[in-house]
Image (cartoon, rainbow, N blue to C red):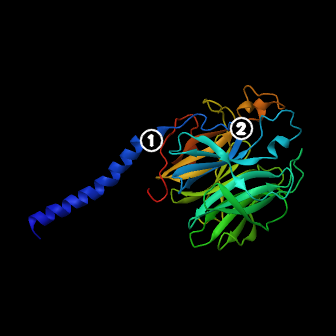
Amino acid sequence: MTTIRILSLCLLIFIGLLLPACMHAQQNAAAHMADKPLFRDPVYDGAADPVVIWNRKQQQWFMFYTNRRANVKKARGVTWVHGTRIGIAVSKNGASWQYLDTAHIDHRPDSGYTYWAPEVIEHEGLYHMYLTYVPGTFTNWNHPRSIIHLISSDLLNWKYVSTLDLANDQVIDACVFRLPGGGWRMWYNNEKDHKSFYYADSPDLYHWQDKGPAIRHRPGEMSGEGPKVFRWKDRYWMIVDNWAGLGVYSSADLLHWQRQQERLLEHPGQGADDQAIGGHADVVVNDGRAYLFYFTHPGRAKAHPAPDTTVAWRRSVIQLAELKYQDGRITCNRDEPVKIKLIPPGSE
C-alpha cells in the first residue's frame, strides 16, 4: 500500500470519528431552553396526561393531552374532568409549544362523551391511538370506561377501529410498547383490581389478548395510574403516577418489575407553576437523553393550596424535566433548566 493510500485511509478514519462528535456539538448548540411551564392550554387551562410524537408529514412534534375543562364555571362534582376532548400542541424543537386544535375523533356514540389519556404510536407510516373512552359527562367516578383503538394518517383525523376486550368495564390509561422479539404489549390500569397494572399482547396492534396483572396492588398499598414504558440505558423502565410523585419500576424482560424506592417529582419545585407534585407523564428518549413530560396542578401546592372549588385548584399545566441515570436508578431535578432540541426519528 502506497504512502498516499495509507494517508487517505487515515484521513477517512479520522473524519469518521470526528463527524459524529461535530454533529452532536451542532445539535447541542442548536438546542433551546425549554419554557417554564412548558405549555398551558389557552381554551380550558387544564392540560394533562401528555404524549409526544413526531409528525412526519408536517415535520414537527405533536403533543396530545387530555383537555380538562378547568375554567368551566359552576362545574358540578367532577364534570370538569369529563366531557373532555384531546388537545394538540405543536413544536419544532420540544422547547416551545403552541396550541393547534383538538383531535378530530369519529367515535361519539354517547351524549357528553369523554376522552382521556391518549397513547399515540407510529408503525409503518400509520398512527395508532389507544384512548380511554367514558360514555358521558358525569358528576362522579362510578361509571364505565374502556380503551378504544383509532388510526390516522396525519395525526389530526382519527378513525375508530375497535373497543378492546380487556379485564372489565373500568380500564384506563393505555401504554403500548414494541416487544424486542416481535409483537406489541399494552399496559393499562385496572380500576376494579385496586388500580393494579394489567397487560395485554398483540401481534399486529389490532388483536389483543389480555394477560392479567403485571404489577398488582393490594388494599392499602401505594397504587397509581398512567403507566409509561420505555427503553433507556440498556434497561426497560416503567414510570407511573402515584398521586404522590411518580413511581419508577425497572425490568430486564418486560415481565418482572422491580420498584425503585425513590419517587420522582414528589417534592415541590421552585419554577413557575411547578410547586405541586408531578403527575401522569410521558418519556421521550431522544439522542441518548430522556425527557420527562409531566403535568402539575399549580393551585395544589402544599405551601399555598387554593380552595378545591376554584379554577386555581383545578387548572393544570405541562412541565418538562430531564431524567438522569445514576447507579441503576433514575433521578430527576425539576428545578434544573432543560436545554432541548428533539431530533426527528431516523436522524439520531
Asked whether the residues under the numbered discs 2 and 1 touch, taking CB atoms below 8 Å apart as contact, a structural biologist would say no
Q: Quadrant of residue 212?
A: bottom right
Q: Residue furthest top?
A: 304
10 Å neighbourhood of mark 1: few (<14), some, or many (≥20)? Answer: some
Secondary structure under the numbered disc 2 in the rendered image = loop
10 Å neighbourhood of mark 2: few (<14), some, or many (≥20)? Answer: some
Q: Would residue 302 appear left or right of 73 to someone viewing this image?
A: left
Q: Position of residue 184 (x, y in %)?
A: 64, 68
Q: Quadrant of residue 154?
A: bottom right
Residue at 68 percent of width and 36 percent of height: 42
Q: Position of residue 162 (x, y in %)?
A: 76, 67
> Is 287 rendered above or below residue 31?
below
Residue placed most toward the observer, 198 or 150: 150
> Is 199 rendered above or below residue 244?
below
Quadrant of the image containing the C terminus:
bottom left
Whether residue 188 is visible: yes
Identity of the amino acid at label 1? Ala
Identity of the amino acid at label 2? Val
In the picture of the structure, the residue carrying the numbered disc 2 is: 43
Q: Position of residue 61 (x, y in %)?
A: 55, 49
Quadrant of the image containing the N terminus:
bottom left
Q: What whole-number distance in Å separates the C-alpha atoms at marks 2 and 1?
A: 29 Å
Residue placed most toward the observer, 331 or 101: 101
Q: Would residue 283 appear left or right of 196 to someone viewing this image?
A: left
Residue 31 has which mark?
Answer: 1
Q: Position of residue 93 (x, y in %)?
A: 50, 45
Residue at 86 percent of width and 37 percent of height: 75
Residue placed most toward the observer, 328 or 101: 101
Q: Would residue 250 appear left or right of 11 to someone viewing this image?
A: right
Q: Which numbered disc flags the more N-terminal residue, 2 or 1?
A: 1
Numbered disc total: 2
